[in-house]
Image: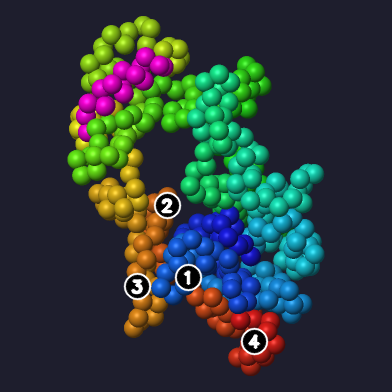
Amino acid sequence: MGQLIAGPFAGQLLGQFGAEVIKVEPPRNGDPLRVWRELDEDGTSPWFRSIARNKKSVVIDMRKPEGRDLVKQLAIKSDVVIENFKPGTLERWGLGPADLRPHNPSLIFTRVSGYGQTGPWAPRPGYASVCEAESGFRYINGFPDPESQGLAGPPVRPNISLGDSIAGLHAAFGTVLALLGRQRQSTQAGTTVDVSIVESMLNLMEGIIPEYDRKGKTRGPSGSSVTGIVPTNAYPCLPDSSAPLIPTYIVIGANGDSIYNRLMEVVKRPDLTGPKYEQNHHRVERQIEIEEAISNWTRQHTVDEVIEVMNKVGVPVGRVVTVKEVVEGEQIKARGAVRDVWVGGEDKGWNVKMQGTFPVLDGVDPQPKWAGPDLGFHTDEVLMSNLGLSSDAVTKLRTEGVIG
């Protein structure tokens, strides 16, 4: 019963590894994500075709009591309910854990919200952007003010809904743990997986909280580097001859002690090695001179030249690429990390490229079985096969506007 990103991404992950995922959508327009961002020739977002892969679309009007009863019947026959409504919404509809578990005691409820199901902020609406800010994540992303070391201007946002996807990962992970626990304990007790977007983002914050607690340090933004690890940064290179006015950068991560020494040999600065630069905490104290030495060398070389040299000596390096270069990349192709999935019928349709199935598991087919379906494509199939409704009953529900 999830919409947009967090809940549906959790469902996508579970569906990739074999779960039967029934996606309940409202009539007429369905999940709003169907028309987000770029639209294909049929008016549907290619993004939706990806995030709704391997799912069955069932259209039910949950505003109607008959619709809520259908959803209740489906949930009772399921192992897991995934939802990302504002806390309390399902309870008002009579579809919360207390309403369903008397009929299915082992039902797992995976609930994604901005701030969790409890606490004074639980009733607040919480989109990923807001929750990223409240988790402290946005404060550390941007460029530092030289004087305050705080943000020099607005925080920089990754151009994706990171908080939603991270919460979806936690939801899928929590769901699998709940299923595993149920299997191991042979218990009939259901479990609630309470996923907060804020807390999911906190899980990414590494040592920021313990460092603040023990040392009083407030980590701030660090531009294209990362605080306390040297050297790892994006370094300027000579422009590509085909686009001489466009700046180019290379990312080098040489924070391992022996890797750092090899890098300094390449950039012809062996004077920046030895006891004063031996370990990371030594290099942090001398970050400016180290970064300048690397930049002065990369500025004299093209991206391809830097990559060739770094690969020869075993220094981690990567170009800053666009999606075009990702899709065409030899490693991505060799791994089958991008897949073509058919959209449409036997006579007419097209392939849409989407990410494959990750992580790669032995015995799991990485090819998505089908792209996100048209709205209500599986309504009749699910109601008849899962709930045992007759064709006449389904027709009656559709005539009454309960299903689409």
Give the Cα separation between the discs numbered 2 and 1: 25 Å
**Residue 203 versus residue 218 in the image, above or below:** below
**Residue 69 versus residue 109 in the image, above or below:** below
Residue type indicated by callout 3:
Trp
Read off the magenta span.
287-302
Residue 384, quarter of the rendered image: bottom right
Give the Cα separation between the discs numbered 3 and 4: 30 Å
Give the Cα separation between the discs numbered 1 and 3: 13 Å
Give the Cα separation between the discs numbered 2 and 3: 24 Å
- The residue that appears at 47% across and 30% down in the rendered structure is 223
Q: Element at badge 4?
A: helix
Can you identify the residue that label 3 sits on? 350
Can you identify the residue that label 4 sits on? 398
- The residue that appears at 69% across and 69% down in the rendered structure is 76
Q: Is residue 117 visible?
A: no
Q: Which mark is residue 358?
A: 2
Task: Look at the numbered discs 3 and 4 and tell me whether their residues touch, using CB distance below 8 Å.
Answer: no
Please state which of residues 175 and 341 is positioned toward the viewer in this rendering. 341
Q: Nearer the viewer, mark 4 or mark 2?
A: 4
Q: Nearer the viewer, mark 2 or mark 1?
A: 1
Can you identify the residue that label 1 sits on? 44
Looking at the image, tell me whether mark 1 or mark 3 is earlier in sequence order: 1
